[in-house]
């Protein structure tokens, strides 16, 4: 939606020297990659997270309702260009390198990055192709605090904590660091749930290693994914969302998630012409 901005951090970057400090303090590396070292972590102790939960997460808890659109960057989006302008009045979540797809034509409500590689210098900078300057809100879903001006930090559970095993977070309380869904749109859908959305509409989740929205033939994912793990996470998410009264479906034409029956398919055109699910 237009001009709906979350609580954005202000002031100087308190982590400006963290990269240099990490050289003098090797323990910084252990904190950053402590997922490999943790023993006895539980959701109740926030997976041994050493940092306080960001205050902005409480500010936006259940602030919204209805439906949201969660976009991957799959090549099927290239065939849905004509429908993109109709998303201008919707809550749209994008992720990763979506800024490369110039045909989107919609200002994302939230743009998220969920992988560590784009965050440079211990979370004080970001690789430009992963930024989205036009997004209303930008969120880094990361294991350690990210202090990039204009970005919000959302804690992420260690990588072995996955939706397929731990379940779908965000529809209960309190807030816990988010388990990975092995696919960025699924991971960030838990943030959308925490914000109050209960109708989750995925698109551009082709679940293929070949093609991107901006280059359907040759573009490839930068990091190969275990497709079976992604599908297991989506399957568990569907079960949990439906059990808790939400709805979820896939608007990706020919996408593997709907072809294999994990999420029901609906055409994006039909969804956009229908009324959102009534608020509970």
Image (spheres, grey):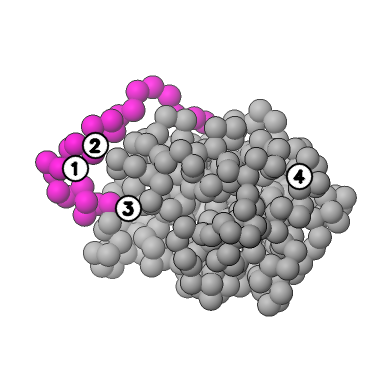
Name the mark on residue 242.
none
SS type, badge 3: loop
| Between discs 4 and 2, the one toward the N terminus | 2
Front position among marks 2 and 3: 2
Q: Which residues are magenta?
A: 7-32
SS type, badge 4: helix
| Between discs 2 and 3, the one toward the N terminus | 2
- Cβ–Cβ below 8 Å for labels 3 and 1? no
Q: Tell me the residue that label 3 is attached to.
A: 49
Q: Tell me the residue that label 1 is attached to.
A: 22
SS type, badge 1: helix
- Cβ–Cβ below 8 Å for labels 2 and 1? yes
Residues 83 and 233: in front is 83
Name the mark on residue 84.
4
| Between discs 3 and 1, the one toward the N terminus | 1
32, above or below 249, in the image: above
Front position among marks 4 and 1: 4
Report the residue that reaches farthest toward the front. Answer: 218
Mark 4 neighbour density, 10 Å: few (under 14) some (14–19) many (20 or more):
some
Q: What residue is shown at x 38% (from left), y 51% (from top)? A: 117
- Residues at marks 4 and 2, CA–CA distance in whole angstroms: 40 Å
Name the mark on residue 18.
2
Front position among marks 4 and 2: 4
Q: What residue is shown at x 66% (from left), y 70% (from top)? A: 257
| Between discs 4 and 1, the one toward the N terminus | 1
| Residue 45 left/right relative to 56 | left
| Residue 157 left/right relative to 265 | left
């Amino acid at each position: 939606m237009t001009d709906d901005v979350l609580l954005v951090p202000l002031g100087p970057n308190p982590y400006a020297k963290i990269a240099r400090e990490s050289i003098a303090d090797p323990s910084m590396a252990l904190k950053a990659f402590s997922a490999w070292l943790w023993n006895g972590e539980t959701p109740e102790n926030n997976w041994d997270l050493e940092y306080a939960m960001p205050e902005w997460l409480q500010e936006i808890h259940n602030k919204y309702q209805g439906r949201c659109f969660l976009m991957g960057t799959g090549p099927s989006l290239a065939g849905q260009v004509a429908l993109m302008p109709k998303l201008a009045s919707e809550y749209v979540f994008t992720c990763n390198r979506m800024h490369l797809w110039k045909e989107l034509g919609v200002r994302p409500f939230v743009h998220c990055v969920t992988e560590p590689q784009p965050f440079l210098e211990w979370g004080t900078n970001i690789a430009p192709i992963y930024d989205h300057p036009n997004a209303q809100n930008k969120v880094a879903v990361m294991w350690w605090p990210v202090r990039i001006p204009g970005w919000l930090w959302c804690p992420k559970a260690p990588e072995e904590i996955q939706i397929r095993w731990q379940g779908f977070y965000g529809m209960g309380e309190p807030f816990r660091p988010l388990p990975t869904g092995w696919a960025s749109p699924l991971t960030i859908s838990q943030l959308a749930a925490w914000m109050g959305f209960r109708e989750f509409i995925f698109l551009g989740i082709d679940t293929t290693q070949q093609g991107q929205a901006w280059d359907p033939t040759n573009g490839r994912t930068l990091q190969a994914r275990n497709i079976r793990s992604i599908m297991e996470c989506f399957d568990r998410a569907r079960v949990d969302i439906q059990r808790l009264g939400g709805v979820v479906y896939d608007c990706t034409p020919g996408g593997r998630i709907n072809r294999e029956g994990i999420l029901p398919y609906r055409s994006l055109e039909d969804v956009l012409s229908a009324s959102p699910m009534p608020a509970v």
